Structure formats: C-alpha cells, structure tokens
Amino acid sequence: MTETAARTAVPADLAAVPAELAAAPAGPDPALAAPAAASADLAGTDAPTARRDFGMLWAGQSLSLLGDQFMVIGLPLLAVTVLGVSAARAALLPFALFLPFLLLGLPAGAILDRLRRRPVLIACDSVQLASYLTIAVLATLHLLPFWLLMVLVGVCGCATVFFQVAYSSFLPTLFCEQRSLQRGNARLFFSESVSRSVGPMLAGPLIQLAGLVVGVFANVGTFAFSVLTLLGIRNREEPPRAPQREPGWLVRDMREGLRFVARHPLLAPVFACGCVYVLFLSMIDAILVLYCGQVLHLNAAATGLVVGAAALGFPVGNVASTRLADRLGMPRTLVLGASVSVTGIVLMAVAGSAGSAVGLVAGSVLHGMGEGAFGPTSLTLRQTVSPAGLLGRVNSVQRFLLWGTVPVGALVASVSITLVGLRGAIWIGALGTVLCLPLLLRRGILADLRGGRALPAGP
C-alpha cells in the first residue's frame, strides 16, 4: 500500500523485489524476539518539546505538501506552454523525479542511519528551494531550456529521496509512546490527503489568474516556510552510534537493512503486500483518465471528480487509523485497511463495466478510506519494530520497493492497453491488487489474526 502524495521479504514470484529479499531465510531473526517497543527505542517518554516541535513539523510539511500539488499541475504545463516542448517530452518530467528512488533508494537509508535526521531534512528542503527558484527565475527570463529543467527536476528527485527516508525516521526522535507516534503519523497523512484534494483546486485558479511561473514561485515559498519550521524545532537528536566506516560499508549496511526486512515476521508481509498493490494501482492511475474519457465518455469535469474522489476518502481513513489501531492492534488494522482499499478498487472496475460514474466515485472513495487507514499504521509499525540504528534503512527499502514500482506499473499498463484495450486493462489492474491480500496474510500478520498477538494493540 502507498503512503501517498504518498503514499513490501517477498516470494520468489514477485519479480520487482531484489533477490536479496527473496533469498533471505524465511524464519525470524533471533534478534526480533526482543519486545518491539524496546527494539525501536520507544520505551521512554516523549521529548519535553515534542508537542511544540511536532506542531512546527506538521505546519511546515502541510504547506510544503500543498506546494507539491502546484508542481503536479504546473511543471508539465510549464514545459508545454512556456518552453514549447511536445507532450511526449513533457511526460518525461515524472520519470526524472522518480528515477532517483531506483538509483538512490537503498543507499540513502544506509547513509542516513549514520547522520542526524533534522539537518538532512533542512538541507534537502533547501536544495529543492534553490532548484525551484532557479526554474522560476530562468522561466521568467525565458532562459530555461528543457534539458536544464529535466536536470533540476532530477536534483529535486534526489533531494526528495533523502528527505522522505529521513522524514519517515524523524518522528520517533520526538515521540517515544506508540499511541503518540500513531497519532502524529495519522496527522501527517491527513495533511497529505487534504493537500491532494485541496491543492489542485487552489493551483488551477492561481495558475489561470497569475500564470505558471507564479505557481512555481508559490512552491518556492512553501519550501522556505518548511525550512524555517525545521530550524525552529528545539529537540536535538542524539548522534547515531554507527560503526566506523570501512571498505564495503555501504553495501554491507544495505544488505543488513534488506535482511532485517526479509526476516521480520511483520514487515516482510506488509512490504510484499505494498509492492504488489502499488504495481497494479499504478496501472489504474495510468489508465483511469483515458478510461473515463474514451470508454465512459465523461467530460473533463466529471473525469476530474472520479480521479480525485479517492482524496475524499483518505482523510476519513487517516483519522480512523489511530482508533482502529488502539482497538484492533496494528496487524489487524493493516488487514482491514488493505481489504477495504482493494474492495473499492474492484468496485471501480465493476462500476466502469456497468457505465456508472457514480459507482466509480463510490469505489474510489472507499479505496481512499482503506488506504488512508493502512498508510499511517504501516509507518508506525516500521517505526515501532525497527531498531533506531536500522530505521533509515528499513524506510529506504520501503521507498525503493514501492516508489520504484510506479514506473513499472505504468509500463505494464501500456502493454496491457495494447493487448486487451482499456476495458481489459482496468480489470487487470483491479484484480491484480487483490493479490496483495494473500501476501499480507502470512507469518506474523496471520499469527495475530489467529489470536496470537504479534504486536501490542497500544501502550
């Protein structure tokens, strides 16, 4: 399942997963027998300034996520209308943004486990601020060639990789209690969900009234605000106790992270589930706009409603996730969230075959509710069961597998459309997401469903 915005060891038949994962022993590592809270350094109390610092982090990231939505609309239009490139070349911009996740996803975790997270967050936001400011200024002066735009977007992608891994690992330095951690993650996911629905509604009119370059400048402003809020965080992390660097340390550390995930009875099923889910969901994302227009003959406004409907369900799932985790425990909440999300996606395919736009919207909202509950709970699970010295690498494995699967899903969608058309391709994507459920219902997750608590329901 995705965390986005946002939003996996696995069986041998999951080709998208590195061989290191598939080859790892199936049994749990003896180190995992320690209590989950202790292994994640969550046995203490929250930092004295935790609430204030989280408020700063939440405010900065909420506005920054809103600015990201400006770029979802603004960058492709900037390339086509201001730079005069073709739509096919403009479509390469997401490739430039996501390629670093495949190239840097695993090394980023190994590197960040040796660094304090807050300075990395500040540096990454500063790099993105400078890159988007350069884009805005050069575009205003009509001095921005497309190749330089691609390079600058790629630089932003590299900064995003390190930011996302550090960001996912930072909250446990503020919150040591599991319930506080779950609540904080839910609030951050809520902001992401709201930005995905409100962002395009604000970006469109602003770009229409003030121009594309103003939209880029607005995004620069959100990064500046985010840097200021990160600088305002008072809590200071302890320096990580990493072993001395020696030849081959990077590869060794990456293998250690992969091995930990592959052997963990809870993380392995969750990562496998997410990898397969994102693969087929990416197919649907690549198909849905074309499907609404060419198969259902919906106009642009109706298509936008269908595509954006999932964002209406995400906040509901985000808000409910904390209460569900308290009542059911995290493993059962994950199963419930995944089941609801997959049900919504299959309902979308059924509604599409029946020609029902209302059914498509209902299925999309249901899918958003399930994913909205799954996302923050899976992040809290990673933060809770991973040792502090491995958390960056665990998060990097998740980003590498899930975000790296997005371009693969788009490629599979293209092949499917060629072979079976849009009607058949959307069914392949919908039914493919169902395959994530048996991958989730294994090992520690299955043990919890059978009555043996794999993880406490709360503190």
Image: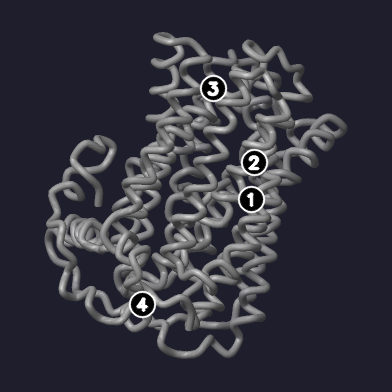
- Work out how far the residue at label 4 is from the one at label 3, CA to CA, in angstroms: 40 Å
Residue shown at 48% from the left, 23% from the top: 427
Residue 321 seen anywhere in this rendered image of the structure: yes
Q: Which mark is residue 314?
A: 1
Helix, strand or loop for disc 2: helix
Q: How crowded is mark 2: few (under 14 residues within 10 Å), some or many (20 or more)?
A: many
- 400 in relation to 377, above or below: above
Helix, strand or loop for disc 1: helix
Residue shown at 35% from the left, 67% from the top: 448
Q: Which mark is residue 287?
A: 3
Earlier-in-chain disc, 2 versus 3: 3
Task: State the residue lying farthest toward the front.
Answer: 450
> On the rendered structure, is 183 left or right of 166?
right
Q: In which quarter of the image is residue 110?
A: bottom left
Q: Name the residue under label 2.
A: 310
Task: State the residue lying farthest toward the right.
Answer: 209
Q: Residue 262 carries which label?
A: none
Residue 393 seen anywhere in this rendered image of the structure: no
Q: Residues within 10 Å of mark 1 (few under 14, many from 20)?
A: many
- 277 in relation to 8, above or below: above
- Work out how far the residue at label 2 is from the one at label 1, CA to CA, in angstroms: 7 Å
Q: In which quarter of the image is residue 44?
A: bottom left
Earlier-in-chain disc, 4 versus 3: 4
> On the rendered structure, is 321 left or right of 311?
left
**Mark 4–mark 1 contact, CB under 8 Å?**
no
**Mark 1–mark 3 contact, CB under 8 Å?**
no
Q: Mark 4 points at which residue?
A: 40
Amino acid under disc 1: Phe
Helix, strand or loop for disc 4: loop
